[in-house]
Image (spheres, rainbow, N blue to C red):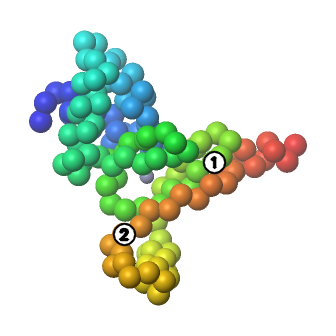
């Protein structure tokens, strides 16, 4: 494990949100000033291939997290705040539903739920 990879993992595991590659680059650059964007991308790809990091597409932007076990996301469409959401019941229900309609054997699922976070919902009422 290289120093660069460790810094990327450290930053990702400490950030509660789902940072973009740009966020990761900025954070790692603060510690390793000579790191290039290409190096950050290469390391991210390596970590994804080795199941240490997961990439999620949120509104067309790639975001990264160290929580690799399948889970869902609730996303604010105004400020792009993202929260993790887990529900065994939802998974079971979705998989049963798909089983009844397709010939696929589903292994896992990730869903994005778009809406307004508490803060944005309050603001839009004013
Ligand atoms: Zn919001
Ligand atoms: Zn997540």
Considering depth in this image, is 21 or 14 the residue closer to the camera? 21
Furthest-front residue in this view: 103
Q: Confirm or reject: label 1 Cβ below 8 Å from ligand 1.
A: yes
Above or below: residue 44 compared with residue 116: above
Q: Position of residue 110 (x, y in %)?
A: 44, 62
Residue at position x 87%, y 43% from top?
126
Q: Residues within 10 Å of mark 2 (few under 14, many from 20)?
A: few
Quadrant assignment for the N terminus: top left
User: Pointer 2: what residue?
Assistant: 108
Residue at position x 20%, y 27% from top?
4
Above or below: residue 93 compared with residue 46: below
In the rendered structure, find residue 91 and report the number of the disc placed on it: none
Viewer can see residue 41: yes
Q: Secondary structure at mark 2?
A: loop
Question: Mark 1 or mark 2, which has the lower sequence index?
Answer: 1
Q: Position of residue 97 (x, y in %)?
A: 50, 82
- 1 vs 2, front mark: 2
User: Pointer 1: what residue?
Assistant: 76
Residue at position x 72%, y 44% from top?
120
* Left or right position of 49 against 11: left
Q: Confirm or reject: label 2 Cβ below 8 Å from ligand 2.
A: no
Furthest-left residue in this view: 1
Viewer can see residue 89: no
Q: Secondary structure at mark 1?
A: strand
Q: CA distance from mark 1 to mark 2?
A: 24 Å
Q: Position of residue 94 (x, y in %)?
A: 49, 77
Q: Position of residue 46 (x, y in %)?
A: 20, 40
Furthest-right residue in this view: 126
């Amino acid at each position: 494990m290289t120093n660069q990879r460790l810094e990327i993992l450290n930053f990702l595991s400490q950030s509660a949100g789902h940072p973009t590659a740009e966020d990761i680059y900025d954070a790692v650059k603060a510690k390793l000033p000579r790191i290039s964007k290409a190096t950050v991308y290469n390391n991210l790809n390596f970590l994804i291939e080795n199941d240490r990091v997961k990439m999620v597409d949120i509104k067309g932007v790639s975001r990264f997290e160290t929580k690799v076990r399948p889970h869902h996301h609730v996303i604010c469409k105004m400020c792009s705040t993202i929260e993790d959401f887990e529900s065994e019941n939802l998974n079971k229900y979705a998989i049963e539903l798909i089983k009844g309609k397709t010939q696929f054997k589903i292994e896992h699922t990730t869903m994005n739920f778009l809406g307004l976070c508490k803060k944005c919902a309050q603001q839009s009422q004013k």
